[in-house]
Image (spheres, rainbow, N blue to C red):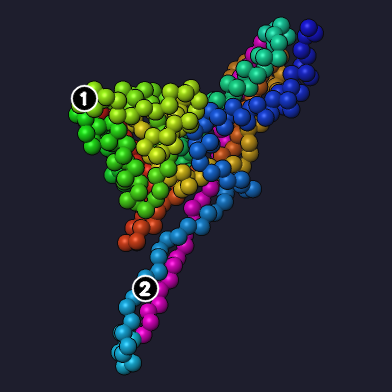
Amino acid sequence: MADISRSDVAALIQEEYRDSLLGHAFNASAALSAFENVPLGTKITNLPVLASLPEAGWVSESVSTSAGTKPTSKATWSNKQFVVEEIAVIIPVHEDLLEDSTENLLETLTKLGGQAIGKKLDQAVFFGTDKPTTWTSLDLFAAATAAGNIFQPTATAGVADLGGSILQAAGAVADSGAEPGVMFSASGLRFRLANLRATDGSTVFLPSLNAGVGTDSIYGLDAQYLKNGAWDAAKATAMVADPSLVKIGVRQDITVKFLDQATVGGINLAEKDMVALRFKARYAYVLGNVLQSNGTLGEPVAAVTNPAA
């Protein structure tokens, strides 16, 4: 097999592997796959949201008092802002390694680049890890905490055990006026649920043990498992959310650039006979609130924490 030249590598990465790169990022990110992706044309985009509801009133048949006059009311709107920020990673690799390898190495590097970007996005959206300050919406765990939608399972079987706590979290989302539709967790949760036993020792829940992503339905909730290392097990065991109220703005899908003359991370690529692949994407994030009938705002997310020690 002929050696792969620099121009061959650039073409393969930028053209042939583009769809593979986007697919790896989409599959690696629970945020991208579970929530609506909103195409954005500018760095800052306003999203109008309902801020207050109109109120109706009873009307009497009186012609001489205000009780006989139909009341007026209004609905008001405010803005949520998408602010686009960049996620990027550069992966240096020695030229000899590329020249002596088959094209599979390029696919591996592409997969790793997509996974790295997907992980960083999920960390910010779910737990606020390195979340850009311009993203003013609370991350999902912080939103659940602010709303008091935190549930800690007990070791005793019943309404407050692990399964019961997930149902309580879903109930809290429903009580906010939102529609609980998806549950997020690390992939090991499905096995812990499968291990739950009733008092007679029988299995109370049996999720799919298929190795695919998002194949389970847990208590009617679509299950999304974060396998990219973004899940913070010290904070939460699971989260339940209304996916229609979480938006991921996409200003630019992942692009990749082949570098061979730059200095990256203190490495002069030309001097070291190395090249590098630069991956970058530009995203925004907005969490919508639920305007409740009493005029207050509810958070469409709840979390299940770790059991008490």
Coordinates of residue 267 in the picture (x, y in percent): 62, 15
Kind of residue at badge 2:
Ala
Circle 1 Cα neighbour tier, 10 Å, few/some/many (<14 / 14–19 / ≥20): few
74 vs 193: above or below: below
Q: Note whether residue 228 is visible.
A: no
273 vs 91: above or below: above
- Which residue has dot 1 on it? 200
Coordinates of residue 270 in the picture (x, y in percent): 71, 14
- Which residue has dot 2 on it? 56
Instruction: Please name the residue shown 35% across and 49% down the image.
Output: 174
Q: Note whether residue 253 is visible.
A: yes
Instruction: Please name the residue shown 39% across and 57% down the image.
Output: 291
Residue 72 sits inside the magenta stretch = yes
Magenta span of residues: 69-95
Q: Please tell me whether mark 2 or mark 1 is closer to you in this view.
A: 1
24 vs 241: above or below: above
Secondary element under disc 2, as helix, strand or loop, is loop
Coordinates of residue 276 in the picture (x, y in percent): 66, 19
The kind of secondary structure the magenta stretch mainly shows is: strand
> In front: 227, or 89?
227
Mark 2 or mark 1, which has the lower sequence index? Answer: 2
Coordinates of residue 66 in the picture (x, y in percent): 32, 86
The image quarter containing residue 76 is bottom left
Circle 2 Cα neighbour tier, 10 Å, few/some/many (<14 / 14–19 / ≥20): few
The image quarter containing residue 281 is top right
Viewed as shown, does residue 1 lie left or right of 188? right
